[in-house]
Amino acid sequence: MDSKSYKKGRGAQINVANRFSEYRYETRNDYLEYCEKEGEPSYDSKTHYKEVCPKTIVNKVDSPDVGMQYSMNIYQGCEHGCVYCYARNTHEYWGYGAGLDFEQQIMIKKNAPELLEKFIKRKSWKAYPIVMSGNTDCYQPVEKTFEITRKCLEVFLKYKHPVVIITKNALILKDLDLLKKLAADNLVGVHISITSLSEDTRRLLEPRTTTIRKRLETIKSLSEQGIPVNVMLAPIIPSINSHEILPMAKMVAEYGASSIGHTIVRLNGAVGEIFSDWINKAMPDRAEKVLSQIKECHGGALNDSRMGIRMHGEGEIAEQISNLIKMARGKYFNDKKMPQLNLALHSDYKDGQLRLF
């Protein structure tokens, strides 16, 4: 790794052009090159926050292979900086780039709790699990300041509505009081992502996420309080973390996980350019091999949008990974599974409220 040019603490090492914009980023800049030679930061290294007020917060998910039907994202952009993140492309719809912008320009949807309450109070709404967050992490560092996720959980609890949480941050434990109350009525499930047991790998792939040790402790703390946890071994990246599938599965089972899932990395849109640039800087010795094996899993391309295939890939490498996951499930999760969430309580709550009038 070229330590002088590598942006420590960030996943993406470049900003890339927004496909919807007529403007383009300048790839060569004499002043920035001079800064790098002098050991000075050659880019704005700070994270910037902007409050926004969207008109809606719950989204209908039309993709049948994603595993959710409704999701909500209270933050746009994610400071965690996971270099492989498929959600980077969504930042372009807000006028930003999918590279450094995604992890430095964070939008805070402050009216999310009010929008959520309005949504689930609709007479026509029939309870179905709403996922936080299908796109960006609802427990990324900014949550510590704004506590919007906590306010949304209070809404779910008030209306006895089921919620699913996806995160890779131990910050979720600050809301343990609410999660325990939701879990008492079987209204919450938590999905925690773990990509590696190696801190060196984690720091490169996911520079601003919770350490692996803290994530494992989070799984244990949640499970001990009766809050079901599924662990996503995701994404699996050939020749980076594919050799860790069985050790990761064994470890998370020991820490109390109820089940595991997996996806194979797919580098759609601008993420292909961002990841390729990153791996040539972070892991130059294996860059060509990794990119080649990713292509083998996706019909010869980094970009894979084929419904039903894109998540788990195809070909020999993808099959080997799938077999390891099956082996891990049989060995460590044979008698375990995530419970179905309770959909009836919200309907009972609404019926009870209507009888008051």
Image (cartoon, helix red, strand yellow):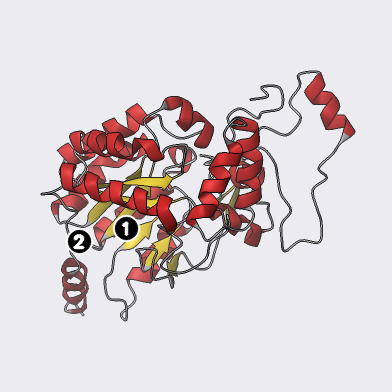
Residue 356 relative to residue 199: left or right:
left
Q: Which residue is mark 1?
A: 155
Residue 170 versus residue 12: which sits nearer the camera? 12
Q: Is residue 183 visible?
A: yes
Looking at the rendered structure, the kind of residue marked 2 is Leu
Identify the mark at residue 11; answer none if there is no mark. Answer: none
Residue at 16%, 37% in the rendered image:
224
Residue 289 versus residue 164: which sits nearer the camera? 289
Q: Position of residue 170 (x, y in %)?
A: 35, 35
Label 2 vs label 1, nearer the camera: 2
Q: Position of residue 293 (x, y in %)?
A: 51, 47
Q: Which residue is mark 2?
A: 341
Looking at the rendered structure, the kind of residue marked 1 is Val
Mark before the other along the chain sequence, 2 or 1: 1
Quadrant including the N terminus: top right
Tag 2: Cα neighbours inside 10 Å, few (<14), some, or many (≥20)? some
Residue at 60%, 56% in the rendered image:
89
Residue 85 relative to residue 97: left or right:
left
Residue 226 relative to residue 125: left or right:
left
Disc 2 from disc 1: Cα separation: 17 Å
* Residue at the outermost right position: 30
Q: Position of residue 342 (x, y in %)?
A: 17, 63
Q: Please determine whether, in this image, residue 23 is positioned above or below residue 233.
A: below
Residue 277 relative to residue 292: left or right:
right
* Residue at the outermost left position: 335
